[in-house]
């Protein structure tokens, strides 16, 4: 089964993938963190956060140098 087709014609299916966001300025108000970090996402959830000297292995990677990352914060200004 390839998954369910939504109203837009896209197939939705759960996939197992990992994504590494490197060198992001991570802001987490809950913990008070404001620092440059690497963030590993696996199966749609944050699986690890570490300083930029720590290397995670992932299927895909994004270099977020100069960008900010707010994990768990919704973008209320999106339209």
Image (cartoon, helix red, strand yellow):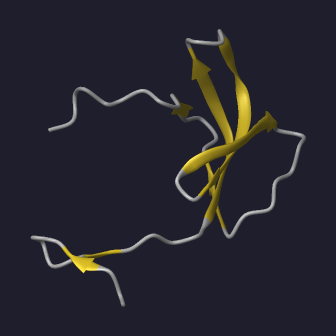
Q: Is residue 50 left or right of residue 27?
A: right
Residue at position x 63%, y 28% from top?
Answer: 25
Vertical side of 7 occupied by 51: above or below: above
User: Residue 18's quadrant in the figure?
Assistant: bottom right
The image quadrant where one finds the N terminus is bottom left
Question: Can you name the residue that lies furthest to the left here?
Answer: 7
Question: Can you name the residue that lies furthest to the front here?
Answer: 1
Residue 8 at x, y = what percent?
12, 72
How many circles with numbers are drawn on the protein?
A: 0
Residue 76 at x, y = what percent?
25, 26
Residue at position x 52%, y 54% from top?
Answer: 44
Vertical side of 25 occupied by 31: above or below: above
Residue at position x 80%, y 36% from top?
Answer: 50
The image quadrant where one finds the C terminus is top left
Vertical side of 32 occupied by 37: above or below: below
Pick whichever, 72 or 54, lies toward us: 72
Pick whichever, 28 or 4, lies toward us: 4
Residue 22 at x, y = what percent?
70, 46
User: Residue 4's quadrant in the figure?
Assistant: bottom left
Residue at position x 80%, y 61% from top?
Answer: 57
Vertical side of 19 occupied by 67: above or below: above
Q: Is residue 43 left or right of residue 12?
A: right
Residue 61 at x, y = what percent?
65, 60
């Amino acid at each position: 089964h390839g998954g369910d087709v939504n109203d837009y014609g896209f197939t939705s299916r759960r996939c197992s993938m990992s994504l590494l966001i490197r060198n992001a300025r991570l802001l987490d108000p809950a913990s008070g963190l404001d620092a440059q970090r690497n963030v590993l996402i696996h199966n749609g959830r944050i699986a690890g956060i570490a300083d930029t000297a720590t290397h995670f292995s992932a299927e895909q990677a994004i270099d977020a140098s100069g960008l900010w990352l707010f994990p768990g914060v919704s973008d209320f200004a999106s339209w």
